[in-house]
Amino acid sequence: MPKESGARKYSDEQILYFRARRGHLTDSGAPDAAAAARAMIGAQSQQLNPSLLALSMRMKDRPTTAELKARLLEPPREVVRTWGQRDTLHIFDPNDWELIVAARGEWAPGGRRGAMPPEALVKKAGELLRSASGPLTRRDLQPILPASYLREAEEKVGPGSAARQLAAGRLFWCLAHRGDVCMADKVGAEQSYVAREHWFPKLKWPRSATAPRQAATALARRYLATYGPATARDLAHFFGARVSSAIEWLDLLNKDGELAPVSCGDRKGLVALTADMPDLSVKPPRSAEKWPLRLLPLWETLLMAHADKSWTTPIEADRKLVWRKSAFVAAVVLARGRAVATWTHKQRRGRLAVEVSPLSGWNHSKHAAGVRREAKAVADQLELDAADVEIGRD
């Protein structure tokens, strides 16, 4: 890690503006879905529609949900949805997929325990997927589940369909961690999965024998290019890794002269890429046109990027309204890099109904017009006629 002596000083706004620009939240947008996903290092996607909104607002011409879903699920596919950092579903640039898989060995183990399938069964499931004519669901894998493995699942969730679903789901999860499968569309109400070779036959795999440490360090560099300056703790938080591992990745970057210390208020341990120092010095514009307000979706990746939540929510009481129980992260109104409100929406008779709940930083005269403009953009993405906005009391 670089020494903090001689650190360049930047204001909060300079850093927030840098992150907004690098994340395509201020410009005309990325040229395609892959570029938007690449800049984010994956759009967090445990629910599909919020992640499609996150991608759309970062893309040129803000494509509709239907258009983006086609780019995900129909050839030629621009992006892939699979398990990534923090053992959470993300949408990635397919060319980043191998890097994500390789780096997994450097990240902390996920929270799944028990009922893990034996290697021979994982191999058999992979062969079944590769030989299938299309995507498969958990129901399709149940005939190959041996009784011994089902008993393990029953010990965890009880007998019957729950055990069969868990056991089959763990097979897909194991294969996805190896980069062998990704998520396809739903078949009825059930999620389906497809072999990588079927959907991305031109994707060379592996392109190289990337070691876990090398892959994790490359992703750390990418992280700083969008979410820097940041600390080792922030970096570990984003990838679901140990802080000691994040320090090792940063040390490797520092040995090559790629890191520089940064000072911002009373925060300690901030580093940025040396190449990004001139861009960090850019003076943030006052114009709302050049730094527009955004309606960020549920589980927005930007909100997951730092362990230090004071960047986006300086007031502790506001943080409890954004980061809630059971790992729920609210949709927020982001103005000049700060969460100034939370928002929810429903579809009513062909219109979008948006309800805004102000936080401490809300200023009606500054923010209301931007919310209405962005609500109309979300309505357009959802192919609805118009947006109706209701703003609660601040």
Image (cartoon, rainbow, N blue to C red):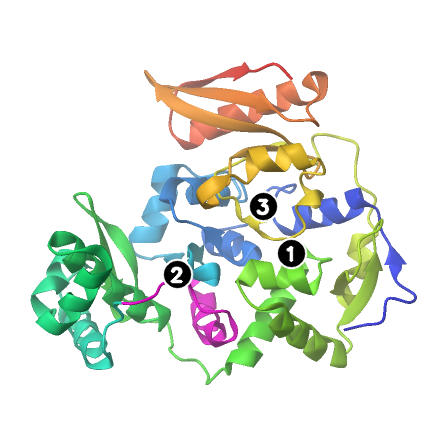
Tell me residue 7's x, y (percent).
Answer: 88, 62
Q: Which residue is mark 2?
A: 83
Q: Is residue 179 above or below residue 375?
A: below
Q: Which residues are magenta?
A: 93-114
Q: Nearer the viewer, residue 342 or 147?
A: 147
Element at label 2: strand
Q: Is residue 257 above or below residue 188?
A: below
Q: Nearer the viewer, residue 340 or 49?
A: 340
Q: Quadrant of residue 284?
A: top right
Q: Is residue 348 visible?
A: yes
Q: Earlier in the sequence, mark 3 or mark 1?
A: 1
Q: Which residue is mark 1?
A: 226
Give the Cα distance between marks 1 and 2. Answer: 21 Å
Q: Is residue 131 above or below residue 79?
A: below
Structural crowding at the residue carrying mark 2, measured as other residues with C-alpha within 10 Å and reported as few (<14), some (14–19) or many (≥20): many
Q: Nearer the viewer, residue 226 or 151?
A: 151
At x 51%, y 16%, the residue is 389
Q: Which residue is mark 3?
A: 303
At x 58%, y 59%, the residue is 237
Q: Nearer the viewer, residue 381 or 219?
A: 219
* Residue 4 numbered mark, or none: none
Q: Is residue 295 visible?
A: no
